[in-house]
Amino acid sequence: MRDLVEESGLMIEAQGLRIARGGQRLLDVAHLRLGGPGPTVILGPNGAGKSLLLRCLHGLIGADVGAVRQNGRPLDGDERARQAMVFQRPVMLRRSVAGNLDFVLRRRGLARRQRQDRIADLLAEGGLQSRGGQSARSLSVGEAQRLAILRALATEPEVLFLDEPTSALDPGATQAIEALVLRASTRGVRIVMVTHDIGQARRLAADVVVMMGGQVVEQGPAAQVLDDPANGAVRRFLAGELIF
Ligand SMILES: Nc1ncnc2c1ncn2[C@@H]1O[C@H](COP(=O)(O)OP(=O)(O)OP(=O)(O)O)[C@@H](O)[C@H]1O
């Protein structure tokens, strides 16, 4: 397997992560390193543990045992501040579209003029130039997801976790999100994205992690994992068989 660490400044590493509830193993990840320059896509069927893993990597939930390290350091406040996360169904603040971005920029301590410039840039980046004054809660689902990503990008994260950001979207809205994510990746934001859409993994991923039954069953460069997986269950999943 290619060593992903050498290619990027930022490396996230999970070691011996285990979560069990009611005697059932939900997550059991022996070792995972995320550090390549392009997007990493975490792929797998429903209930595979993809969201749990993402939440652990972002420090939202702690594993029963095991640890997440970023750049060799425990995931403390300073390290977490370098991360942002966008959820499947983002919650918008009860403010305008611009107000949602302004909220984040204020917390970063930007002066009014700087905030205005940055908001204009972000709205243009997300194709929401004409929506700045509109209530964020009145946006379409696709527009709201774009705003959620812009709001995350407004924190200037080094790593952006995305949990199935296009699962409720049609192809056009999905394309707009994927373009936004790829531009962020090109600018150097480390993308780690969960999906169960194999086509999306093919379109976006530089590296792929496949999860099943709470475990990482395959990981590596996208072409290798998607076209020539070693694991039989992964082969069947990628071939479109119903895996559960
Ligand atoms: N707080 C919890 N308590 C008990 N079980 C949980 C909890 N959170 C998640 N689970 C269970 O852990 C398993 C993995 O859930 P997870 O949401 O990570 O799956 P997933 O791969 O993201 O699936 P999907 O694609 O459907 O979102 C599921 O069986 C889920 O019911």
Image (spheres, grey):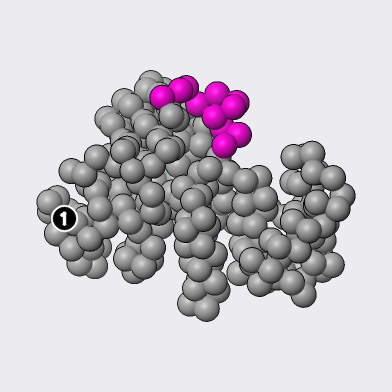
Q: Nearer the viewer, residue 103 or 25?
A: 103
Residue at image location 74% in from the left, 40% down from the top: 108
- Specify the segment rendered in magenta: 72-82
In the picture, measured across the screen, residue 156 lies left or right of residue 48, that is right
Q: In the figure, 51 relative to 95: above or below? A: above
Residue at image location 54% in from the left, 72% down from the top: 176
Q: Identity of the amino acid at label 1?
A: Pro
Residue 65 locus on image (x, y percent): 38, 21
Residue 237 locus on image (x, y percent): 23, 60
Task: Tell me where residue 19 sits by quadrant.
Answer: top left
Residue at image location 24% in from the left, 48% down from the top: 220
Residue at image location 45% in from the left, 42% down from the top: 54
Residue 209 locus on image (x, y percent): 30, 48
Q: In the figure, 213 relative to 56: above or below? A: below
Residue 150 locus on image (x, y percent): 64, 57
- Reading the image, the residue beneath label 1 is 229
Q: Is residue 169 visible?
A: no
In the picture, measured across the screen, residue 150 lies left or right of residue 166, that is right
In the picture, measured across the screen, residue 121 lies left or right of residue 39, that is right
Q: Is residue 81 visible?
A: yes
Q: In the figure, 205 relative to 133: above or below? A: above
Task: Tell me where residue 244 sits by quadrant.
Answer: bottom left
